[in-house]
Image (spheres, rainbow, N blue to C red):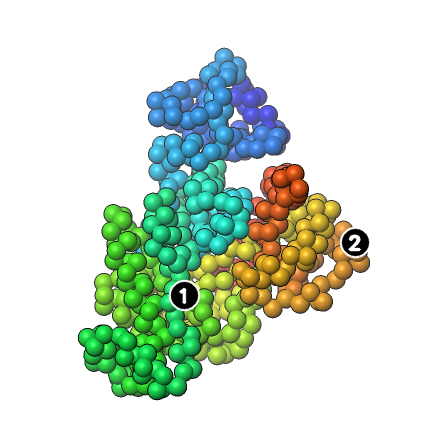
Amino acid sequence: MGNWKNFVKNFCSKESNVEVLRTEAEKGFSDYGVYPRSINEVGKALVMMVRGDKEKSLVVVGDDTRLQNLKGTETEEGGLKVKVCPLSNENCNVIREVFPYTNPQFHRGKNITIGLGDRLGLASPGHIETVRDLDVFPVLAQQSIRELNLTGRTYEDVISAAAWAVFQEGYTKGYGADGDHLKTADEVKMSLDVGMTMITLDCSEHIDNSAADADISELREKYSRFSEEEREKWEEKYSNKTIDIGSHSFHISEEELIRLACVYGGAIHHTLDIYHNIIAKCGRPIDFEMSIDETLTPTSPASHYFVAAELIDAGVEITSLAPRFCGEFQKGIDYIGDLKQFTEEFTVHAAIADHFGYKISVHSGSDKFMVFPVVGEKTNGKYHLKTAGTNWLEAVRVIAQHKPDLYRRMHAFALEHLEEAKKYYHIGAKVENIPALDDLKDSELPELMNKDDSRQVMHITYGLILQAKDENGNTLFKDEFYSALYEHEVEYTEALKKHIGRHLKTLGL
């Protein structure tokens, strides 16, 4: 594997067209390590991605002025000029200029969009193979600031990883890049500056959860802090009004309006400020999602309608909106709650989204197989779903299968540092339900990724595992982890196709 030089000598010196080269590369992938779909012609030069012993590279055979800014090592193979280039962000920018399909794209108008967060920068090839033949728009580059901080990556890294995967797989149908769960103006500006095509604004810090259960006298005092003009506008639009949405209707009393305003008024103000002063002025179309899901307060139909109507009436173009649904959407496990209640409430939420012309967004969507049929049906096939941690867990599963010693060390470390990880994520995992490692054979380790408690522990400790170092500054797990996944690239791709494929099948795709 990885003897791409022989591929160059055997085929690139001949008058073979790109399709012939791709056929030869596919037939001989185990010998040459040349990714067939990555082979492209740029003028008189050939460009391809190759698999070396320890890492992938971009190889240019011949020369073209459009490729002159690629940084790499120049050599000669079989009398041909060759440049071997690392898959750096700088080189990725050159490829993105030459091959526009490798750039993230705006996706408003696409019915089904799936966020496929890739915390490792290795999952996108598997994601692409999973959605390639489906009418699904993948948001391959999806990361929150929290995830960036925990993995030590940047948005440039995230976009480059997705773009390289798109180039490797010859995927020309388009993909998106989501600056996920951004909270501040500076975070939104930074995300736009690096080219994110979707902004998910997390309004949790501007939602007053205490107002959800506060006494009406306390609420009236809070309500009085809004301007008289705004209060009069709200009262005229919503107070003692029955809202009809298709076959659904709900009444907003004077007291409920006051409560809605107190809970969500700050979030509305924050959103309008960010949208009009930053997003709308960035000079290109952006998929905007408002997130009100990272909060203790479930979003009632009246709350959803109030928030959405205020944003749209103020000129905000919403691509999707994420309510806080009933029940629990914990990380890495199935839905916890009353499915009948969820179905009834989700149906109304989907109708409100359809009424206003945007998609409902389901966050923490990894592994929520119980509710996927409801999401697919009640939205009439128009929704956005976000997954991320489940892709990391499939990587961990591959490690458990092929590198049991590494898995055992990671597992022990995760248990030791679990309380620290809980500062970032809420889970219901109980350590006492996880079998002791000493009681498990190596062949039994992968089964831990099928158990809720061990899944959640490994899910939320990803950042601590990836950044852990010894006293000499050497990584405890990261380098070995990445090396193992590189060695077992095919197995990881197949695991993702199977697992994410189950998500899509359960959604009805």
Q: Quadrant of residue 502?
A: bottom right
- Tell me the SS state at disc 2: loop
Q: Is residue 294 above or below residue 35?
A: below
Of callouts 1 and 2, the N-terminal one: 1
Label annotation for residue 441: 2
Q: Is residue 220 above or below residue 27?
A: below
In the rendered image, residue 271, in percent from the top left (x then y), is placed at: 31, 63
Front-most of residues 142 and 360: 142
In the rendered image, residue 73, in percent from the top left (x then y), is placed at: 49, 21
Q: Is residue 441 above or below residue 38?
A: below
Residue visible at 36% across and 75% down in the picture: 263
Mark 2: few, some, or many residues within 10 Å (few <14, many ≥20)?
few
In the rendered image, residue 436, in percent from the top left (x then y), is placed at: 76, 60
Q: Quadrant of residue 42?
A: top left
Residue visible at 52% across and 71% down in the picture: 328
For the residue marked with disc 1, what is the amino acid?
Glu
Mark 1: few, some, or many residues within 10 Å (few <14, many ≥20)?
some
Front-most of residues 200 and 333: 200
Residue visible at 23% across and 74% down in the picture: 227
For the residue marked with disc 2, what is the amino acid?
Lys
Distance CA(mark 1)–CA(mark 2)? 46 Å
Label annotation for residue 22: none
Q: Which residue is under mark 1?
A: 205
- Tell me the SS state at disc 1: helix
